[in-house]
């Protein structure tokens, strides 16, 4: 890998977002890190006396992470332990010894070997919590949030029909116990009791719906899926979709989350808010087109490097962009670093992405007294 890859902030001025002040300051950032531990080379982070990475005070306050997960369980495996705490969370993307390129989508930085471990570990959560997923607990997430000055995190369940999983139920329990975690539930569009389940979760305080096209084998313009998103719109629940093909997901899954499948539901259901996660991964330009033409499309940015984030800002989408981490795939620090780099010298925009926009959306999604 080419070790020397700088982001020159003078280049940002050309993007129309960043004032020319930076160019004169000549701040350049090495975009290639030996591993995540080198995030402390960025001016945003520092280490405490225990050697832990912390976001420095004064960089951003009251951050809201719009994309995280607790350990998922499938096919009857034990649910995540709501009380467990570990010295270090085993994130799917390794925190040690794996080079990081801050200028690319996060999954691109997996090596062949680390991708294989991540794939095995994420499959393993279906039958045991003895691996990485055992550390994906609320307490470990809260610790990560504290280190990054994240006050609240949206936790996204993923479930299958036919009683094959009960993650939404567990997430609701976790959110009750830890109010800084905000639950988005999952009801499979093909669940025979779809409507009843969605209404029941909403009555219990679920804020939104998570839909994962490749894992749930469904496209956004599928008739059943559109029934689900329509219902969510009526109930005031935003629908957060995984979008874009991940670099480490199996090829057969890559068609499900394509951006073109969103045009129909987005345009036919103006009442529903569609939050498209990961900024469409490598299809962010298509997502920008969709979002420019449809006010009910929001973009969650997890994994996106600075350049696409700036393109979105230049497209005028600054009021509908949301910071997300995809913890425990990644730490919260890594995607946070990318948003901070993208918004260097644009404090208002930074505040919108890290807090204001999420606050607005959550306020709209809040359960009104029945
Ligand atoms: Zn995710």
Image (spheres, grey):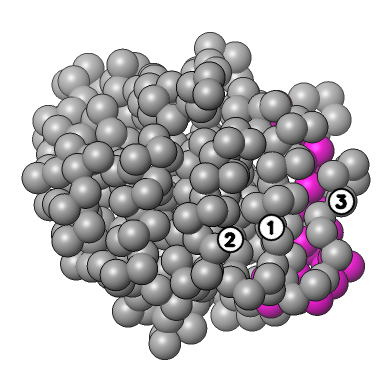
Tell me the distance, in whole angstroms, between the alpha carbons under discs 1 and 3: 12 Å
Assign a secondary structure to mark 1: helix
> Where, by quadrant of the figure, is residue 293 drawn?
top left
Q: Of tags 1 and 3, which is closer to the observer?
A: 1
Q: Residues within 10 Å of mark 2 (few under 14, many from 20)?
A: many
Tag of residue 81: 3
Tag of residue 158: 2
- Residue 105 magenta: no
**76 in relation to 289, above or below:** below
The residue wearing badge 1 is 167
The span shown in magenta is 122-148
Q: Residues within 10 Å of mark 1 (few under 14, many from 20)?
A: many
Nearer to me, 14 or 60: 60
> Where, by quadrant of the figure, is residue 358 drawn?
top left
Assign a secondary structure to mark 3: loop
Q: Is residue 261 left or right of residue 84?
A: left
Assign a secondary structure to mark 2: loop
Cβ–Cβ under 8 Å for marks 1 and 3: no
């Amino acid at each position: 890998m080419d070790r020397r890859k700088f982001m020159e902030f003078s280049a940002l001025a050309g993007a129309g977002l960043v004032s020319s002040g930076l160019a004169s300051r000549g701040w350049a950032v090495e975009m290639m890190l030996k591993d995540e531990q080198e995030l402390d080379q960025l001016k945003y982070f520092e280490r405490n006396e225990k050697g832990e990475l912390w976001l420095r005070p004064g960089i951003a306050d009251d951050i809201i992470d719009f994309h995280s997960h607790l350990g998922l369980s499938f096919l009857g495996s034990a649910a995540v332990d709501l009380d467990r705490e570990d010295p270090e969370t085993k994130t799917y993307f390794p925190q040690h010894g794996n080079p990081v390129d801050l200028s690319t989508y996060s999954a691109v930085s997996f090596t062949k070997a680390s991708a294989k471990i991540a794939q095995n570990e994420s499959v393993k959560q279906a039958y045991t919590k003895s691996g990485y997923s055992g550390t994906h607990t609320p307490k470990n997430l809260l610790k990560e949030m504290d280190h990054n000055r994240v006050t609240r995190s949206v936790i996204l369940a993923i479930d299958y029909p036919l009683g094959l999983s009960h993650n939404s139920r567990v997430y609701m329990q976790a959110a009750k116990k830890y109010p800084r975690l905000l639950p988005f539930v999952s009801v499979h569009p093909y669940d025979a009791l779809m409507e009843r389940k969605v209404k029941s979760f909403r009555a219990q305080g679920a804020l939104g719906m998570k839909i994962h096209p490749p894992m749930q084998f469904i496209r956004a313009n599928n008739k059943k899926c559109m029934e689900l998103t329509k219902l969510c719109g009526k109930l005031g629940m935003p629908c957060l979709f995984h979008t874009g093909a991940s670099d480490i997901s199996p090829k057969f899954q890559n068609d499900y989350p394509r951006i073109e499948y969103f045009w129909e539901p987005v345009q036919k259901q103006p009442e529903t808010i569609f939050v498209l996660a990961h900024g469409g991964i490598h299809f962010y330009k298509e997502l920008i087109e969709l979002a420019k033409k449809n006010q009910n499309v929001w973009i969650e940015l997890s994994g996106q490097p600075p350049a696409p984030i700036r393109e979105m800002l230049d497209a005028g989408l600054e009021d509908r962009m949301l910071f997300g981490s995809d913890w425990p795939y990644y730490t919260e620090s890594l995607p946070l670093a990318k948003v901070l780099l993208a918004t260097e010298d644009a404090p208002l925009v930074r505040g919108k992405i890290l807090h204001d926009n999420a606050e607005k959306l959550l306020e709209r999604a809040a359960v009104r007294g029945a």
